[in-house]
Amino acid sequence: MTADKQKIPPDPERAVEEYGNSLYRLCTVMLQNCDDAQDAVQDCFLRYITRAPDFRSADHEKAWLIRVATNICKDMLRYRKHSSYLSTDEIRNLTSSEDNAQILGMLGLLEEKYRTVIHLHYVEGYGTNEISDMLGITSAAVRKRLQRGREKLREIYEKEAI
Amino acid sequence: MDFSKIRPAVDDIVLSDEQKEKILDACRGKKRKFNYKPLAFAAAAAVTVVVVASPGFLFRAGSSDNAAENVKEDYYNSAGGDFYVYTADEDFSPQSAEENGAASDMSVFDVSLFSEQYSVIPREFATLADSTEYESWVAEISPDGGMALMQFVKHFGIERSDFDNANIAYAARTGKFFNADEIYSQK
């Protein structure tokens, strides 16, 4: 009975309000395109309506949505013929200061696999084990990607500083 | 490079109210779990074929001709006997129809054919498999094997996403055939 009480039934209005922005940020960073990101978020919530399991907790629900969103983004990237980057104007529209715009632009220059783990770790605050569960890769691979991602970001930062 | 600046950099990326409403609108149009529409259309198709295309089929399906005749008579009398009541053509038989050269038009009246209706793979699904392999598989399976579509999916290892897309196309086609929009728009 206690377990049943803790289960969270799917509720799209609450979920969009609570997790919509997080998912939109993740998809924007992964896809580097606002329209595609919105489509991905919508697709994610459609899957939430039709296929969501019984969630044990709010954390479980959020992690499930993030895993679905990353899978959708990966599928979209797989079928995309050309690389996409947020334009300077788009970045300025999305951010409120030059510093933020610079960091968002730098993130866009990273490879997708590094962008995703950097985002999940530094923005969503997930640890390597949680990220490994979400992305279906080993913890060691997550740590390696974080390390490489940080190195590459530093390189890009130094080049931009020059 | 200060990595703690990454979070505030993306914090400004938020969905507008309009975008949220659009997502919720899409969610409201979706049903949870299984989509029964294609099955409903298929069932409607089977019932329509049986009832409309087989004169007297329902009456003759009973074990006693006399009982069926009594039911018809009671119904006619209870209705006051002054409006049209359908009566079966007692002399009709598929064999006689064939003998009269009407086989192509009348074959649907052969009740034994109906069992095959449940073994048909709609074309939207059939095209997911290689045509040569599909034809040889069709020749192998028994019409009485049941759930041909399930056998088909297992045999050809059809992907879930491909199946779902074919299902949507099948629902759209059958819905159009039965004029579903008009039926469902009537209150």
Image (tube, coloured by chain):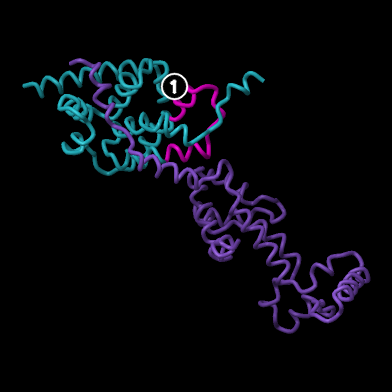
Q: Is residue A62 left or right of residue B36?
A: left
Q: Is residue B149 above or below residue A58?
A: below
Q: Is residue B49 above or below residue B170?
A: below
Q: Which chain does purple denote in the image?
A: B
Q: Main secondary structure of the magenta part?
A: helix
At 24% from the left and 42% from the top, the residue drawn is A82
Residue B119 image point, x, y percent = 66, 56
Question: Which residues fall within the magenta stretch?
Answer: A43-65
Secondary structure found at label 1: helix
Which image quarter holds the N terminus of chain A?
A: top right
What number of labels is visible?
1
Residue occupying the far left of the picture: A162
Q: Quadrant of residue A75?
A: top left
Q: Quadrant of residue B22?
A: top left
Residue occupying the far bottom of the picture: B100
Q: Quadrant of residue B113?
A: bottom right
Q: Is residue A102 left or right of residue B6?
A: left
Residue B29 image point, x, y percent = 50, 48
Q: Is residue B179 above or below residue B92?
A: above
Q: Is residue B177 left or right of residue B46?
A: left
Question: B114 or A92, which lies in front?
Answer: A92
Q: Which chain does cyan denote in the image?
A: A
Residue A80 image point, x, y percent = 30, 42
Residue with the mark numbered 1: A133
At 61% from the left and 58% from the top, the residue drawn is B41
Q: Can you see residue B132?
A: no
- The amino acid type of the residue labelled 1 equals Asp
Instruction: Check residue B31 for magenta coloring.
Output: no
